[in-house]
Image (cartoon, rainbow, N blue to C red):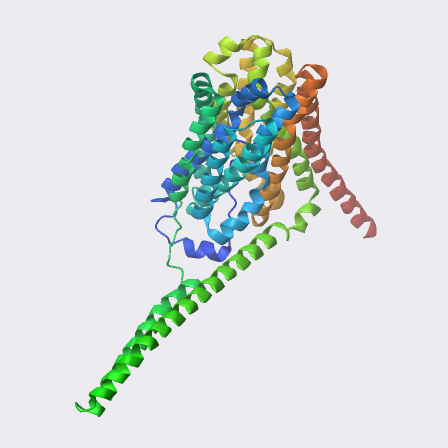
Amino acid sequence: MYTSHEDIGYDFEDDPKDKKTLKPHPNIDGGWAWMMVLSSFFVHILIMGSQMALGVLNVEWLEEFHQSRGLTAWVSSLSMGITLIVGPFIGLFINTCGCRQTAIIGGLVNSLGWVLSAYAANVHYLFITFGVAAGLGSGMAYLPAVVMVGRYFQKRRALAQGLSTTGTGFGTFLMTVLLKYLCAEYGWRNAMLIQGAVSLNLCVCGALMRPLSPGKNPNDPGEKDLRVLPAHSTESVKSAGQQGRTEEKDGGPGNEETLGDLQAQECPDRAGHRKNMWALRILKTLSWLTMRVRKGFEDWYSGYFGTASLFTNRMFVAFIFWALFAYSSFVIPFIHLPEIVNLYNLSEQNDIFPLTSIIAIVHIFGKVILGVIADLPCISVWNVFLLANFTLVLSIFILPLMHTYAGLAVICALIGFSSGYFSLMPVVTEDLVGIEHLANAYGIIICANGISALLGPPFAGWIYDITQKYDFSFYICGLLYMIGILFLLIQPCIRIIEQSRRKYMDGAHV
């Protein structure tokens, strides 16, 4: 897929101690772990695939509401951007509720956003129902899928993440065909209703995200308390019964009235005791929930706001700057290509085999091939990464010059193949910040990509409203993308110069 989405591989509760306890678990790198890969694969199809196919609905919204292209493009960009921007904040839900609950809730919210959007009376209504609601649900369902794959795999983590994220390419192809068919047969409103029903499968995927040790964590204070309470209650009943039998023996058969009085008093005592036990159990449960929320917030806060040292790494800052522009150059074709082919009178050819589907299919092969090349011992990952970036930005510059279906298909194939460099993002990020900061660094990169996805498509639509062409939007985004790449190239040169200066100064002092 792309940077932010795909091989995020960050575990919000990833702690070295936890890793030691999870290592001997039989499902690590096998068993139920492959069900996590399958679950994540379908999450990528349902979320990322459908988002990459939103260009089909964008054309329908333009015809329905007769708004400007810049304003209408905000619907798709809000959904895609919020899915990424909320990534670090979803960690709070994961730390508090767990991946399974977060994913199931996200599936429900996402489905609700699709269904409510079917009743939209204007574009501004879609901003809330589809952009915010469906986007938030997508973020809540997507991140747990990536996190759970990371938790279930250690030795084969890269392979597992790679297999699961290929769902994006398959999803883009399948969802594009599905949405085009549904819109043609039933109209875009009914198509969104049906897609909302299909999105409920995210809840099924979330249900498959079984924790490694459900209900068997001895360090969980809530579970300790809940286990102690019934035992204490049983002991109290037994001791009360033993006291009653002792008194019965001491009183003898002649004290029937005294025994009756004791039994009469025992009933309200037991009822009161049960009420007290229920109240105590509720209080202990609330206390446990409060502790979970507080611990989850502390872990989340320390993980994302305790990383100021990352911003002292100038190479990483340049990497963030690159991410701000790289992702918009990848997203814009998905949103606006369906309308571009209409402007070029290529709709009939595009209906046979959509250009966005070409990007999606070739993207899958690009990820695999570039990953294999980067793993070769004589090849530098950074060289492969930068070469793929140059190929992508060159394709963005050439795209407006192509006015035939064959030419556009070739450029889209280049975009799909070169964008496979996103599978190299975990390795590149680790080289920049180290393995100990990888999780937090990826969270920041996600936000940068989310901002890019949020602003890119509306910017392209706004440029069209002014110039009546999409050409300038590709040129401007390509230029900004090139500046981001140059920032990545300049930083190592600056570092080499500084190191040489330090060596020279040290030699001068000696």
Residue 141 horizontal side relative to residue 482, left or right:
left
Q: Nearer the viewer, residue 208 or 310?
A: 208
Q: Nearer the viewer, residue 338 or 495?
A: 338
Can residue 217 be seen? yes
| In the displayed structure image, the side of residue 348 where residue 86 appears, left or right | right
Residue at 55% x, 39% y: name it. Answer: 427
What residue sits 43% from the left and 44% below the top?
Answer: 155
For the image shown, how many numbered marks are present on the structure?
Answer: 0
Q: Residue at x 37, y 57 (%)?
A: 215
Where's residue 408, x and y in %? 56, 13
Q: Residue furthest left?
A: 253
x, y (%) of residue 65? 59, 21
Q: Is residue 329 visible?
A: no
Q: Nearer the viewer, residue 493 or 240?
A: 240
Q: Quadrant of residue 239?
A: bottom left
Tell me where residue 103 appears, x and y as whole percent. Answer: 45, 43
Q: In the picture shown, does residue 343 fall above or below 396? A: above
Residue 471: where, in percent of width, then height? 67, 16
Residue in the picture at 46% in, 54% down: 19
343 w.r.t. 9: above or below: above
Residue 27 as seen in the image, left or right of residue 177: left
Foreground residue, 55 or 271? 271
Q: Residue furthest right?
A: 508
